Image (tube, coloured by chain):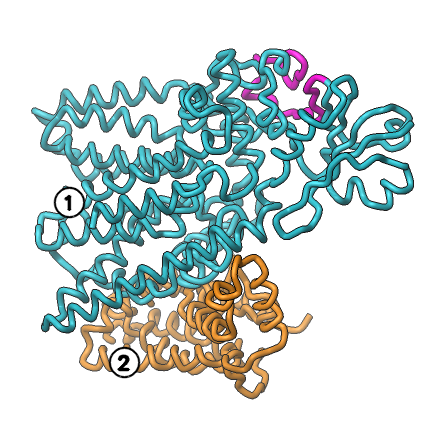
Amino acid sequence: MSSLNKPLSRLFAFVCLSLWPVVFLITARWEPPVSIFHLESENIQSIIRKTSPYPTAFLARVFQNKASIPITKFEHNLTALLDPNNYFFGYHPREIFGGANAVKFPFIALPFFLSGLFYLPRTKTGKLFILSLIGLVLLLSLVNNFAVYDFVLYFPLAYVFLLGLRNKPSAYFLVCLPLAAFEFGRQIIMLLPK
Amino acid sequence: MLLLAVFLTFATRFYNLGIVPAGLYLDEAAQGYNAYSILLTGKDEFGKIFPAAFRSFADFKTPVYIYLIVPLIPLFGLTAFTVRFPSFLASVLTIPVLFLLIRKLIPNQKLGLPLSSLTVLLLAISPWHILFGRTNFETNVALLFFLTGIYLFCLGLVKPLYLILSGIVLAIALPAYHSERLLVPLTILYFGFRFGRKLFKKPLLTPTLIAIFFGVLISLPTLLIINTPGFLSRVNTLSSWLVDNAFYLRVRDFFSLYLSYFSPRNLFFLGDAGPRSSFPELSTFYFWQLPFYLHGLYLLFKRKPLGELKNLTVFLLVVSPIPAALTRDPFSTIRALPLVIPFTILISLSLIQIYQSLKTKLKKVAALTVFILLLFYSLAKLYSSVFILNEYFRAPYWDYGWQQISEVIKNKTDPDLPIIIDNARAEPYSQILFYTKYDPAPYQRENFEVPLSEYYTNLTRVKEKSLGRIKTRGINWEQDLPIEQYFVGDYLAISEEQIARHHLELIAEIKYPDGSVAYRFVKTRP
């Protein structure tokens, strides 16, 4: 991580990586984990409502059944955790109703993440790291209220970001740093109680 | 596999075409009626001779689709089937064009045939592509012209005559849909950048210049109105760039919208939020394709022997979301339809890479079995979503009921009595024109909106329409009740309480497939 020796890139990394911890400290609340297999009555009611258009009871049972509830929840959670808009834009433009929708990294950090992802498999422990990250994401997807616990992804994502900072010229950081700082300040102000 | 893809494309798009989705949305009806008007009078509903953009509802519809409907009306009549047929046909023709394009771009024959075959097979069952292949959306026709233009260009690099055809086809793609107005020039720039040296040297120089000449010539009607408020009306109504506030927020908003077109959440779970641009419980891709999408993205940048296909896929990935991201709507699959091509290529690339990496025959057979099962699962999901849930829950969004209302007008009313159709929450005049096949000539005379000299420049609208004895306007109970006439309106405009209070005679009650009231048709008793 040679470029991190440069003070400008270090400052940029600090600003980008500070946002999520600060957001976490402001918004964190304790909730016990709820499994996706926990069925609520409104989920079941929704399934029952959808059975009426099918021509036969058999078809209704095939397409609309209780098993689809945890599957849909899992799909929702997994895609939300893999959504880049979740991390860089607080799910904007399709925010989650009732969710915190907090920005986790300044959006200017995105190219560095992509660069990090590109270099990741080339590192010594890259494949193991990717497998662990996939495992973590799959595990979080089994939790209904995954947003309370997704801060565990901060550390591996921070590593990917730092990897992406490698060998970038200082001019990049000269442009990106003010934007990152501006976004950092904007997000914190928006989160603070009015 | 190509034959299977063509068969599945035909089956998934042609079955009950014109019947499913039930109803005919007002834009579909307007396009159909304008084509009918062109056929009979050579003018659109406002009396404009062969317009370059159709004024309809002052949102200025793109012209190619409407002109494609015109020759179909003598063959199939003015029906929902007819107005959706060009979309269906474009959808089917996209399959062989894409197949040939991929074959042409990949030098590696071991990869070329399976990749092109699998890509078209996945496109055949793609919910994103199926939706726009069953309904009247110009975007699908534009995509066909766009891809054909690219394919002809690739052929033209070897056989110069095709360059001229490419110029013509791309010039047709340009006004075919709003997104292509940006995509086509960007593609031409890309071609210029990538092959400029070859194009402007012999033997390609002359065909290139002829292609440019024909391209500009065909685009002239569009170019002549490019600065009018009519042409820009879509940009002005949909753009987030022009109306929002600070520069920083605009840039940030653009990037968030742009990135949302790559978001697994939007592509594999949520889909398009629009009830007419999505199917219930079905996203733009099937959830099982998610890992292959991510893997395909990785392979695209890692895998070497993809030849020119790699450049084109990257170009389409980068450029296709731009027109959609410039508008205010989050994740608009209509405007970003060209993205379906590179995404499907990525998924196919991953599937083939995984299959080819399997060492034993047993593993390959197992993989094929799983894939066939996934294919059946996808078709079952399509059936449930397109033919069952969409019909039952989304009929109101497809303006279901106006065909039945038109039949009541024809068969159950006294032809001497006036009819008032409430237009407080809808603009049903185009559906009534469509289903009653109202003569365009008197309609053009009786419904003045703006002088023809201001057709593209004056966006003033007149919402009250006169179709002989039928008027579309709000019901004024005080003034309208003392006259013997008919009222048509939804359950809010004509409630059960109003029927009882005003002693109205219920002529017909049109219901949605879920049993709720769509419209009531009543007669006054003065």
Secondary structure under tag 2 reads helix
- Host chain of mark 2: A
Image quadrant for the C terminus of chain B? top right
The amino acid pointed to by label 1 is Arg
State whether residue A120 is above or below residue B60.
below
Give the percent coordinates (x, y) of residue B347: 27, 58
Residue range corresponding to the magenta coloring: B445-468
How packed mark 1 is, by other alpha carbons closer than 10 Å (few <14, some 14-19, many 20 or more), is many
Q: State the hue of chain B.
A: cyan
Q: Which residue is mark 2?
A: A129
Q: Is residue B466 left or right of residue B261?
A: right
Distance from Cα at disc 1 to Cα at disc 2: 37 Å
Judging depth in this view, the residue of B286 and B46 nearest the camera is: B286
Q: Nearer the viewer, mark 1 or mark 2?
A: 1
Asked whether the viewer can see residue A175, the reply is no
* Magenta span contains residue A149: no
State whether residue B40 is above or below residue B98.
above
Q: Are marks 1 and 2 on the same chain?
A: no
Residue drawn at (46%, 33%), measured in percent from left and top?
B81
Residue drawn at (90%, 31%), measured in percent from left and top?
B478
State whether residue A148 is above or below residue B401.
below
Report the chain shown in orange: A
Q: Is residue B444 left or right of residue B165?
A: right
The amino acid pointed to by label 2 is Phe
Judging depth in this view, the residue of A159 and B457 nearest the camera is: B457
Give the percent coordinates (x, y) of residue B17: 44, 39
